[in-house]
Every structure is written in structure tokens, then in C-alpha cells.
Amino acid sequence: MTEQIINAAVKMLEISEDEAGQRIDNYLLAKLKGVPKSLIYRIVRKGEVRVNKGRIKPEYKLQCGDVVRVPPVRVSEKTQAPVSSKLNKVASLEQQIIFEDDCLLVINKPSGIAVHGGSGLSFGVIEGLRALRPEARFLELVHRLDRDTSGILLVAKKRSALRHLHEQLRIKTVQKDYLALVRGQWQSHVKVVQAPLLKNELASGERIVKVSPEGKPSETRFSIEERYPTATLVKASPVTGRTHQIRVHTLHAGHPIALDDKYGDKDFDAEMRALGLNRLFLHAASIRFEHPKTGETLRLNAPLDEKMKAILKKLRETK
């Protein structure tokens, strides 16, 4: 297996005012594109990355004027997707942009594309957007979506916008609504699921989440959108933002999401596959937040794709 040199020589980089406030691990991920997160943590832990000549932890927040030592980095080259395939993916992302100004870019992320190209993946939404907007000095994810979840994804085009939106997420003033197709008849009285979630990372790097008293407090609000004989379309509005939260909370309520490869039900999945469903039926349908520059309340909607709409149409016909 050949090696790819991402950073050929030691670099000393001074942090600008616009770059201040972010964690060193996130800064390095942006600077060393294509380097796995595990390698970033390793070079920080070993002291190969230094700030103002001193060792730091991955969660260290950079300050204006900090000088960062970035060492040479080599990574094993994995089999890359053909260039034409990547270009097609990048071009398709352009069609999915639903809002853009000088502060923000909002995309209706397709299912099956990771938000970033870590974890052995060479292509992610953020890499695609950077290829589409080579002139953009700053493009960073405001939040994340699971690879198989589709829908609204916010990307900041300015450090100030990222900080403002992160603060809104922290104080829970951002309203996010998802659509999920779940097994069986969701009970009308179940409007809120409050169940603490504990995240476990397996040796393979795979993350599994379960309800546990030792977990972090987690809350999702639910309402019924449409009923079918063997399934329910629900709107899920997470109050907290834990990994796999909606997927585990629907399972905890006794109604796993269709085609969830980690927390799903095989019989229900087989029934949905027979209708033509070939992906997790979880979609970030809308978001409401305060524009970081104008202060205006923005509400953005991302429509379901045609395949998902066709599944719902077939379910209606079974009534």
C-alpha cells in the first residue's frame, strides 16, 4: 500500500482572529484534509503538534496569535473512488443547496453520503462543498447528520457565524424536525421520550448507543404525521443532540425506524423493502434558527426525495 504525504514539512501557523475559538483537533482536520481523526489525535497526544511550543490536549481552544506547530504527516492511500464518480457527486451537491448567503450554506444532504470524509471515507459533504466553492476561505459544519440520514445540514462560511450558531445549539433555541417511518402504530399519548443515552465505541470504530441510567440526559418530542396499517410516519423533534438519538428513542418506544441497520427490526425492514425502500427512512425535514448576521428568524424546509414520497404513496394505497 502506497503512502500519501499530506504535509511534507513542519509548518508554523499563526492563528488569525477568524480562526480563534475552535478546538485544535477540528482546526487540524480542516488543515490536514484527508488525514483520519485517529491520526490527528495520535500526533496531538504524542506532542508532535504544539501550540506556543507547549503540548496541548485535543480539546484545547485556539486563541488569536497562537502559533501552531504542524508536523509532517503521511497516510496510507486507500483505494480512491474514480475521479468521474467524485465529480458527479460534487455536481449533484450543487443541486441540493437550498439556501446560501455570505454567512451560511444550507444543503439537503442525500442519504448515503457522510458529512465528512473521515473514518476511511475519501469523500464527504464538506469536501464536496469545498470543491464547489474553492474561493471560500472558511467552510465548516455547524452540526452533523448520520451518513444514512438525509435532510437539512448547516454549513458556516464565517467563523463568527459558526460561533453564533453553536451558541444557539448550546442554549437549545434551534428547532429541528425530522420525519421518520416507524414500525407499528405509534401511540398518540407518547409525545415525549426522555431516556438517557450511553454511547459505546467498538474496537472497529463503530458506535452503538443504548438507553442506560449511566447515559447522558436525552429528550425527543414526537407527533404523528400519518398512519398506515403496519407503520406510522412521525415527526421527531430532538431537544438534545445525542448520537443516534432519534433512532434509539424510537426503538425504546417500541417503534424502530424502517431500514435502520443498527437498531431496526428485520421483519418490518423486509416488508418495507418489498415496497421498494432501500435506505434508512429518517429525514431532517426542517430547521428554525436565528440568522447569525441579521438576527432574522429563518425557517428552512428540505423536501423528501421522490423515492421516499413514492414509498409513502404505496403505504397509503394499503389502507
Image: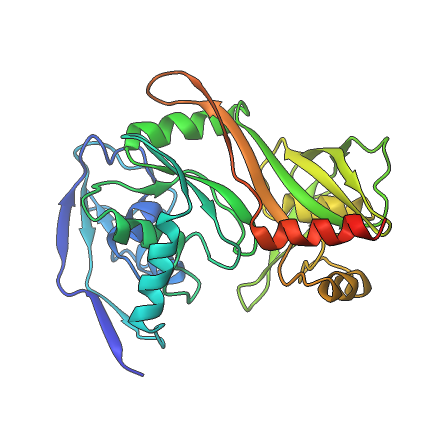
Residue 60 at x, y percent in the picture: 34, 40
- Seen from the viewer's position, the closer of residues 174 and 64 is 174
- Using the image, determine if residue 283 lies above or below residue 173: below
Tell me if 89 is positioned left or right of 15 in this view: right
**Rendering colour mode:** rainbow
Residue 23 at x, y percent in the picture: 34, 41
Query: Residue at the spot x=33%, y=20% of the render?
Result: 293
Query: Residue at the spot x=74%, y=43% of the render?
Result: 233
- Seen from the viewer's position, the closer of residues 166 and 110 is 110
Residue 98 at x, y percent in the picture: 42, 38
Do we see residue 74 in this rendering? yes
- Quadrant in which the N terminus is drawn: bottom left
Tell me if 258 is positioned left or right of 239 in this view: right
Query: Residue at the spot x=29%, y=32% of the render?
Result: 159
Total marks in image: 0
Tell me if 178 is positioned left or right of 58 in this view: right
